[in-house]
């Protein structure tokens, strides 16, 4: 129960999936989590099979076949597979055909309702997008990181990590749907109307790009837009130490930027890519879902691939990347075992791989890289990680004491021979002491970074305690 309470507390403060958090905290391995999920799927499958069996036509009594002419069995009606916007595919929806001879009353009692058909597409006119552009401009002018358009709710903005109302008049469902669908091209609109959700990038000249998601819910159609500036930021723009630039000097290996959702991982990654693009003459290949910051080729040639538009998946793009002669491979997110495996292989074969991962500390990042694999492979993977991992930057964005912004707090791991040995020997719990004493190599614990921000008066002690694992290390706590 203590472990579950700890994971639930972490979920309440940092967000995320409870199963993933249990893995990050070391209470479950990735293999155990997958075993639990498979068991749950099997229970659901058995329940559906039982329900299906109960609705089968009873075997007719002897002679019944002679009393009525034989009817050919009706073929199951296979519906179109549920359309799915990137990044992942949905399983096809195939409602069962009612058994022959079943009465309408019996159908209503024994069968689940079939999935609703795709909603008809409303007519979209050229001017329908203008109200959305006005809302996006309003959000950007106020410094919002995210602009929320919700049916029957006033405009909402994410300002310095806080969710705030930005108006009084609710947005009517019809108006919300028209303005949101007007932001999609015809193919995207078809995907959304079939699946009820879509991820995409939306560009507005003079305003920037937006990582966007539309989804249907009980009140209507909603959208969330994450603002992405036209130009990649510098480390200084992000309030990050310039010492992180040294991680772009590697020519081979794996460099990870990690943290919870909405902590600036993509921006930090973009700043690193821009440094390489400015200083080196190489081929940079990015694989993203969707493409966020657009990097014009400077000294490097930069090719950016959008999962769902330019490639089927992260894994397929990574397999192809090894034949496309890149020097640097940028992966928007390490999402699954296959992607992690391919990233490690690319790092081993002479490429610099930059990627993000949803973990809350550097040590949990190492454990996640290993734990995603089956137990029988983990010794081999520890060896690969110990040889390939160059650095992990784990970051949080903390509201400032004056309420006018957020500042990054970092935990930094730089792999050296001693840390590589600890990873290989499965002694990652000993890494924290090396982070604490490795300041000369650019390492630090999250608590050290938070303590410095508290001492400087940049953030409050209460905010620091909310984001740390050991409050005893925060001054005055």
Image (cartoon, helix red, strand yellow):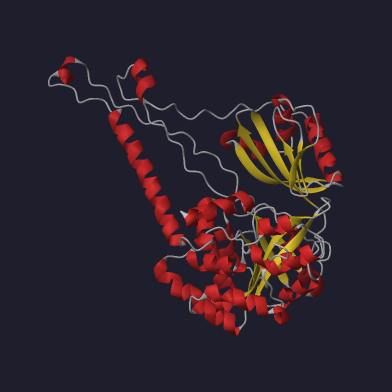
Where is residue 111? Give x, y as percent.
38, 26
Q: Nearer the viewer, residue 233 or 84?
A: 233
What residue is shown at x 41% (from left), y 67% (from top)? Answer: 375
What residue is shown at x 83% (from left), y 45% (from top)? Answer: 140
Q: Nearer the viewer, residue 113 or 411?
A: 411
Q: Quadrant of residue 212?
A: top right
Above/below status of 35 relative to 71: below
* 417 sits to left or right of 41: right
Above/below status of 142 relative to 384: above
Where is residue 148? Give x, y as percent.
73, 39
Question: Disc count in the image?
Answer: 0
The answer to whether residue 252 is visible is no
* 421 sits to left or right of 73: right
Where is residue 112? Give x, y as percent.
41, 28
Where is residue 370? Give x, y as percent.
50, 68
The answer to whether residue 193 is visible is yes
Q: Quadrant of residue 157?
A: top right
Above/below status of 159 relative to 471: above
């Amino acid at each position: 129960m203590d472990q579950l309470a700890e994971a639930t507390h972490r979920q309440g403060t940092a967000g995320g999936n409870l199963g993933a958090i249990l893995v990050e905290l070391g209470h479950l391995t990735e293999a155990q989590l997958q075993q639990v999920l498979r068991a749950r799927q099997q229970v659901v499958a058995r329940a559906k099979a039982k329900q299906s069996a109960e609705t089968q036509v009873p075997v007719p009594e002897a002679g019944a076949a002679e009393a009525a002419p034989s009817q050919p069995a009706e073929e199951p009606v296979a519906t179109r597979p549920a359309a799915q916007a990137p990044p992942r595919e949905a399983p096809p929806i195939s409602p069962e055909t009612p058994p022959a001879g079943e009465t309408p009353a019996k159908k209503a009692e024994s069968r689940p309702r079939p999935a609703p058909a795709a909603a008809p597409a409303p007519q979209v006119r050229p001017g329908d997008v203008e109200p959305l552009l006005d809302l996006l401009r309003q959000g950007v002018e106020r410094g919002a990181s995210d602009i929320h358009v919700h049916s029957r709710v006033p405009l909402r903005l994410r300002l310095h990590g806080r969710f705030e109302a930005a108006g009084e008049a609710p947005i009517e469902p019809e108006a919300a749907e028209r303005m949101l669908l007007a932001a999609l091209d015809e193919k995207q609109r078809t995907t959304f109307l079939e699946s009820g959700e879509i991820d995409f990038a939306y560009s507005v000249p003079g305003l920037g790009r937006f990582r966007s998601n539309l989804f249907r819910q009980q009140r209507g159609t909603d959208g969330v837009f994450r603002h992405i500036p036209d130009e990649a930021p510098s480390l200084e723009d992000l309030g990050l130490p310039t010492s992180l630039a040294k991680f772009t000097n590697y020519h081979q290996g794996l460099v990870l930027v990690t943290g919870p959702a909405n902590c600036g991982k993509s921006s930090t990654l973009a700043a690193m890519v821009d440094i390489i693009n400015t200083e080196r003459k190489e081929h940079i290949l990015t694989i993203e879902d969707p493409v966020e910051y657009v990097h014009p080729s400077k000294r490097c040639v930069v090719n950016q691939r959008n999962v769902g538009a330019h490639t089927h998946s992260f894994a397929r793009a990574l397999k192809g990347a090894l034949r496309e002669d890149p020097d640097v491979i940028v992966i928007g997110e390490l999402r699954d075992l296959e992607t992690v495996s391919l990233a490690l292989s690319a790092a081993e074969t002479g490429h610099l791989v930059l990627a993000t991962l949803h973990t809350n500390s550097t040590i949990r990042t190492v454990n996640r890289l290993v734990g995603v694999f089956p137990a029988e492979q983990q010794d081999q993977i520890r060896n690969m990680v110990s040889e390939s991992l160059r650095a992990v930057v784990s970051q949080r964005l903390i509201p400032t004491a004056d309420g006018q912004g957020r500042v990054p707090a970092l935990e930094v791991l730089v792999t050296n021979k001693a840390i590589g040995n600890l990873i290989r020997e499965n002694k990652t719990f000993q890494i924290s002491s090396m982070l604490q004493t490795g300041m000369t190599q650019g390492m630090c614990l999250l608590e050290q970074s938070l303590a410095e921000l508290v001492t400087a008066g940049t953030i409050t002690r209460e905010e620091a305690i909310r984001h740390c694992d050991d409050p005893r290390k925060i001054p005055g706590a």
